[in-house]
Amino acid sequence: MPIAKAARVSGWALLVGFLAVFTVFESAKYGLVTTTGAVVGLAIPEVAGRLSGRAPRTAAALRAWWLPTVLLVVAMVSPVGGPPLFTAGLGWLTRITAERLRP
């Protein structure tokens, strides 16, 4: 494996690890509603995969990195939603990042 590819894979793996630990931390900190948000966030890319035959643009948009990032920012600044919305964004971003590790 070339060094550049190994560095890229290692970087993605570190990001996945960080996001997964942060998601679990937030879920444990805030309880069941936040854990439900994390599970929903983790399931969004799976739903996108099932939609890919019928709505490829929607599926591609649901697998984009910027949507969960926007959700994280909105959850941080909005008084509505709070921790469950933030943790859903973390779970979603974790899943998308983990998919980048697949060959």
Image: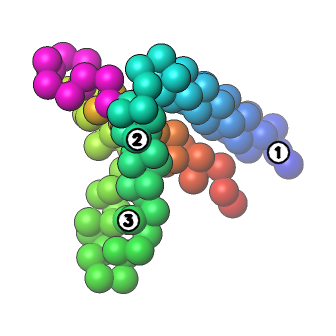
Name the amino acid type tagged 2. Answer: Thr
Q: CA distance from mark 1 to mark 2?
A: 40 Å
Decide: few, some or many residues near mark 1? Use Cα within 10 Å; few <14, some 14-19, many ≥20.
few
Name the amino acid type tagged 3. Answer: Ala
Q: Which stretch did the figure color magenta?
A: 75-84
Reading the image, the residue beneath label 3 is 48
Residue placed farthest to the front in the image? Answer: 32
Asked which quadrant contains residue 34, the reply is top left
Reading the image, the residue beneath label 2 is 36
Query: Which structural element holds mark 3?
Result: helix
Asked which quadrant contains residue 81, the reply is top left
Name the amino acid type tagged 1. Answer: Pro
Asked which quadrant contains residue 65, the reply is top left
Q: Is residue 23 left or right of residue 58?
A: right
Reading the image, the residue beneath label 1 is 2
Q: CA distance from mark 2 to mark 3?
A: 19 Å
Return the disc, 2 or 3, that comes first in the chain's sequence.
2
Q: Is residue 53 left or right of residue 18?
A: left
Could you say which is closer to the camera, residue 7 or residue 97? Answer: 97
- Residue shown at 51% from the left, 47% from the top: 95
